[in-house]
Amino acid sequence: DVKVTQSSRYLVKRTGEKVFLECVQDMDHENMFWYRQDPGLGLRLIYFSYDVKMKEKGDIPEGYSVSREKKERFSLILESASTNQTSMYLCASSHGQGRRQPQHFGDGTRLSIL
Amino acid sequence: GQQLNQSPQSMFIQEGEDVSMNCTSSSIFNTWLWYKQDPGEGPVLLIALYKAGELTSNGRLTAQFGITRKDSFLNISASIPSDVGIYFCAGATPVAGNNRKLIWGLGTSLAVNP
């Protein structure tokens, strides 16, 4: 089975802090994704990556950056956390272009910014 | 970003009833996916559809890829309390280079009264 592991289930940080959310997948997937989920807004794509050191902006990239130094690991960075970034963050991975493979998700990180 | 029209937004049913939900799009899709999310967890893939007209079952769940390629349906038969959760549809358009990203519905929240 595909395993996507997010480093923390719950995280509490303060406004202005730099926050790192880590995600690791064990299925040698080319693509990795970061979403945020808020009530009534569904899943919104922040950034995705289709290869090591490659990244593309999703629908709501403002206030975030990402890093993909190794194929199995995709990090989401909140450069200066703000209260409106309090949310559920979901990481996902899938096989590469040309294969219509579904995305597989981690259990999520519930982030609170105080 | 683009979103799918998913309905109904929420459902409250009695145990044993059948459930139907659907997603529609203004664009043609070549992949339809259905996910379920339990409270506090990440979405889990239920059914993947790759061909217009395709009908696929997973236990009590049945999903169909619409003939027009612009819609999909999910049915749950004889609902049980553990069916409670949020059901999401997601689709991918047949545009070169875009197989990596999915378009999401806002979800159908299902409550089952024992």
Image (cartoon, rainbow, N blue to C red):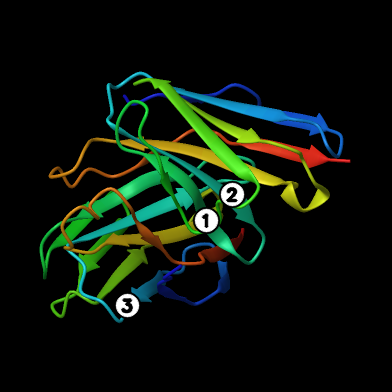
Residue identified by numbered label 2: A36
> Few, some or many C-alpha atoms within 10 Å of disc 3 (few <14, some 14-19, many ≥20)?
some
Q: CA distance from mark 1 to mark 3?
A: 17 Å
Residue at left offset 79%, top offset 40%: A112
Q: Is residue A69 above or below residue B24?
A: above
The answer to which quarter of the image holds residue A21 is top right
Answer whether labels 1 and 3 touch (C-beta < 8 Å).
no
Answer whether labels 2 and 1 touch (C-beta < 8 Å).
yes
Which residue type carries mark 3?
A: Ser
Q: Which chain does the residue under circle 3 lie in?
A: B
**In this image, B7 relative to B100: left or right?**
right
The answer to which quarter of the image holds residue A8 is top right
Residue at left offset 32%, top offset 54%: B60
Residue identified by numbered label 1: A43
Q: Secondary structure at mark 1?
A: strand
Residue identified by numbered label 3: B25
Nearest to the observer: residue B3 or residue B44:
B3
Residue B20: x %, y % from top left: 39, 72
Q: Secondary structure at mark 2?
A: strand
Q: Secondary structure at mark 3?
A: loop
